[in-house]
Image (spheres, grey):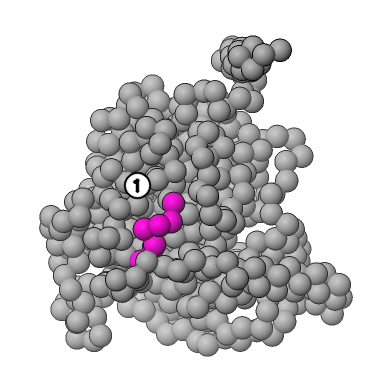
Amino acid sequence: MTRREFLREVAMGSLATCLAASTGGLACRSLFHQPPPNIIIIYTDDQGYADAGCYGAEGFETPNLDKMAANGVRFTSFYSPYASCSPSRAGLLTGCYPPRVGINRVLFPGDKIGLNPAETTIAEMLKPLNYATACVGKWHLGDHPEFLPTRQGFDEYFGLPYSNDMWPVGFDGQPATNWKAKYPPLPLIEGEEPVAYIRTLADQDKLTTLYTERAVKFIRAHRDQPFFLYLAHSMPHVPLGVSEKFRGKSRQGKYGDVIMEIDWSVGEIIKTLRELGLERKTLVVFTSDNGPWLNFGNHAGSAGPLREGKGTTWEGGQREICLMQWPGKIPPGLVCREMASGIDLLPTIAELTGAELPRVKIDGRSIVPLLLGKPGAKSPHEALFYHYENDGQLQCVRSGRWKLHFPHYFRQYEGFEPGKDGYPGPTGRGHTGWALYDLEQDIGERHNVIELYPDVAEHLRRLGEEHMAELRANARPPGRI
Ligand code: MG
């Protein structure tokens, strides 16, 4: 057989498989030969593991998220790449553990570092395939022009360059009198230029709807071309903002109202896809950057049965809501209990679109078999690693049902009076020694069984040390001004 005949055979074979898929519901195996799907990643900020109806939320409803779960896959062991904003986003967009790309802590306005422009983001990976790309919402990977989304593969950018509480305003909406007083006004950026400033709590109320309108406009404008939309909501990060149409609508106060508006936003996106006949051509992913900021009391979400929250490597810090839908490809109502992470999205999208992977080492692995519900599909990771929020040092290793904590200090929310009406309550300084938890029996990490399973602990310790040795040897620097 000549090469030409071979290629023709391959093309015919994939065509036959795809025809079967369109007529009989059989999963198409040759995703590469399809027109590549549109990709939408909706990334919320500080939403808890239990903050959606389909994950057990109480006090508010999320009909659109629940519909996503019914129409696609709901993950129960999906992790954000890190327990705080900037590193988590660096991991999501590069497919790497954040310390590999030098983003080990939250960035501040005017910070001298940012995601290195030399790194390849999902947007840059898709550009050679003629994708239209947009980042709408919170960026937080460097606010100097050389670090903005427009320099990382996004054709369009509209949103806040960092967190919505990095402004010279107190939690009561009055001018800040503490260290926040020195923050510059919070800009809303279009492309690379500020087009407005978020100065009041009333301005914060507009963000979710503003982002949603922009996202819908982008989808409509690119209906005839593959597109990648990264919609990173500023909410439900404090200070909470919610538009008139959802204020007072939940039974759980302002936090519930905010989640209901995000749920509405998801509904608007999916409704638009349906109207344009794009629903079956689009993978939609919904997840959060880290767990709930629990010391904000009734302005924070809930991690449900998980221990602690944002900033910690307890499960409440990094195990997240994660829903994905792609009708016709992802079977409806699938529940995936295998370990997966935000760092897996880049290689997964590469496989689904046929895009070329970055030429540098990445940590994520394709989870396509998990998405498609292949019988017996397993996590591609022997282990996942959790790093400390301020310096990227290793704190935990999870492998299958087991999770090992290396000795470490952590922000402790338990046992401290939470805040009320948005004012932060205190956190404590917790400490754990070596501890092994069986997450299948003990999702709340309460019963240290290290004495019973010393061999398991030793195996995880070794995996962790090998991981860190390799990471230290091959870490890449952040971008610097
Ligand atoms: Mg966050």
Can residue 203 be seen at all in this image of the molecule?
no
Seen in the picture, residue 239 relative to 328 is either above or below; the reply is: below
Residue 429, x across and y down, in percent: 52, 87
Q: Nearer the viewer, residue 260 or 49?
A: 49
Where does the N terminus fall, quadrant-wise? top right
Secondary structure, magenta segment, majority class: loop
Relative to residue 170, is residue 80 depicted above or below? above
Please name the residue shown 69% across and 49% down the image: 379
Question: Can the viewer see residue 357 in this picture?
Answer: yes
Instruction: Name the residue beneath numbered marker 1.
Output: 153
Q: Nearer the viewer, residue 255 or 251?
A: 255
Give the quarter of the image for residue 435: bottom right
Residue 117 belongs to the span the image colors magenta: yes
Find residue 194 and report its horizontal and vertical position in percent.
15, 58
**Residue at point 24% right, 60% down?**
145
What segment is highlighted magenta in the picture? Answer: 114-120
In the rendered image, residue 22, in percent from the top left (x then y), is placed at 56, 15
